Image: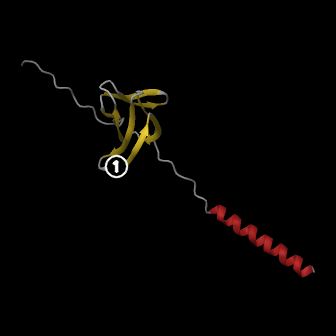
């Protein structure tokens, strides 16, 4: 009887030790670095969103996401972008009249940093957020010498 109790206790100890070792292998999901941008797409009552495309790129390195076959009237998602990365967001939809509207709004910390609007039956709108440290192009001044 005492042998059976020792066997059961030993089996329980080994079981609990094996479950604890798997906890050590836990790797939390790593979120990409960067600031959080909330992208929101809305349409008028007579239109629908059919495709959204996001590209975060720096030089030739790019991360793409395409979500198609949507039939939504509103859509939103949070994206992370580092200061050195550019961000391009395009959405397509269909309207029923020339007054149908699709709108993209990109916010950072509650402040609108980019927006685009398109009107018509075939709706396409694009917003581009440039890298914060991207060199500014000098404006060419016209004049006489």
Q: Quick one: which residue is furthest to the top in this view?
A: 144
Is residue 84 among the parts visible in the rendering? no
- Circle 1: element type: strand
Q: Is residue 1 left or right of residue 128?
A: right
Q: Quadrant of the C terminus?
A: top left
**Residue carrying label 1:** 62
- The residue located at (32%, 24%) in the rendering is 99
Label count reads: 1
- The residue located at (38%, 40%) in the rendering is 50
Depth order, front residue of 115/51:
51
Q: Quadrant of the N terminus?
A: bottom right
Task: Give coordinates of residue 25: x percent, y percent.
Answer: 61, 63
In the displayed structure, 112 sits above or below 83; it is above
Determine the image quadrant of residue 44.
Answer: top left
Determine the image quadrant of residue 88.
Answer: top left
- The residue located at (30%, 47%) in the rendering is 59
Determine the image quadrant of residue 125.
Answer: top left
Q: Quick one: which residue is furthest to the front in this view?
A: 96
- Crowd rating for badge 1 (residues with CA inside 10 Å; few <14, some 14–19, many 20+): few
């Amino acid at each position: 009887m005492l042998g059976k109790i020792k066997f059961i206790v030993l089996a329980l100890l080994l079981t609990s030790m094996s479950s604890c070792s798997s906890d050590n292998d836990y790797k939390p999901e790593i979120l990409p670095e960067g600031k959080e941008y909330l992208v929101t797409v809305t349409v008028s009552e007579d239109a629908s969103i059919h495709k959204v495309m996001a590209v975060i790129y720096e030089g030739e390195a790019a991360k793409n996401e395409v979500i198609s076959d949507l039939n939504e009237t509103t859509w939103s998602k949070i994206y992370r972008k580092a200061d050195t990365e550019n961000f391009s967001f395009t959405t397509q939809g269909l309207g029923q009249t020339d007054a149908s509207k699709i709108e993209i709004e990109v916010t950072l910390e509650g402040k609108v940093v980019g927006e685009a609007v398109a009107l018509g039956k075939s709706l396409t709108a694009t917003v581009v957020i440039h890298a914060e440290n991207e060199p500014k192009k000098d404006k060419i001044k016209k004049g006489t010498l």
